Structure formats: C-alpha cells, structure tokens
Amino acid sequence: MKVNISFPATGCQKLIEMVNERKLRTFYEKRMATEVVADALGEKWKGYMVQISGGNDKQGFPMKQAAHWGTFLAPPTRPR
C-alpha cells in the first residue's frame, strides 16, 4: 500500500510504500478531513498529526467528501 504525505505550504511530498498493511489500520474507515496520529507510519512520524485529504480503495474508487455509505447513512432513494 502506498501513502502519499504532502505539505502544500512548502511543496514537499513523501511517498511511503508500506509492506505491512496491518500498521495502517488506524487510517481505515476514516472520513476525509479527519486528523489522524501518524505514529503507524514509522519512527520518523512519531508525534505528527496528518489530515486525510483523499485516497482510493483497493479497486481504485476515489474517496468523496460527502459520500459515506457506512452503517449510519442509507443511500439516497429515487423520488416516485
């Protein structure tokens, strides 16, 4: 799994390829704009907070800000 970390103010970005996907479970089921502790990314990232601003699932579908089809929200229905 690849994780792209960027800091837009300076234009820096870092691409991290994680072999052990279990370490990234702290990022699973999170919504966009959620701040997450970055300790799972390794020793370099201890104490940092990162904000989720996008991503793809394993099939390649992108994340969307307004859509979260979890157990709390039902999908919209067609008007009759």
Image (tube, rainbow, N blue to C red):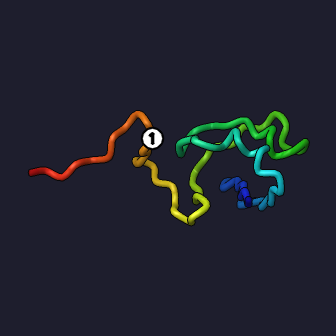
Residue 14 in the image: x percent, y percent?
78, 59
Lateral position of residue 28 relative to residue 22, left or right: left
Residue that appears at 76% across and 51% down:
21
**Three-letter amino acid code at the position of disc 1:** Gly
Lateral position of residue 58 relative to residue 37, left or right: left
Residue found at the very far bottom of the displayed protein: 60
Residue that appears at 67% across and 37% down:
36
Please give the count of numbered marks on the rendered protein.
Answer: 1
Disc 1 crowd rating (10 Å Cα; few below 14, some 14-19, many 20+) is few
Please name the residue that numbered disc 1 is placed on: 70
Quadrant position of the N terminus in the picture: bottom right
Lateral position of residue 57 relative to residue 3, left or right: left
Residue 24, above or below 1 = above
Residue 48 in the image: x percent, y percent?
78, 38
Residue that appears at 52% across and 61% down:
62
Residue found at the very far left of the displayed protein: 80
Residue 78 in the image: x percent, y percent?
18, 52
Residue 23, above or below 8 = above
Residue 17 in the image: x percent, y percent?
80, 60
Element under disc 1: loop
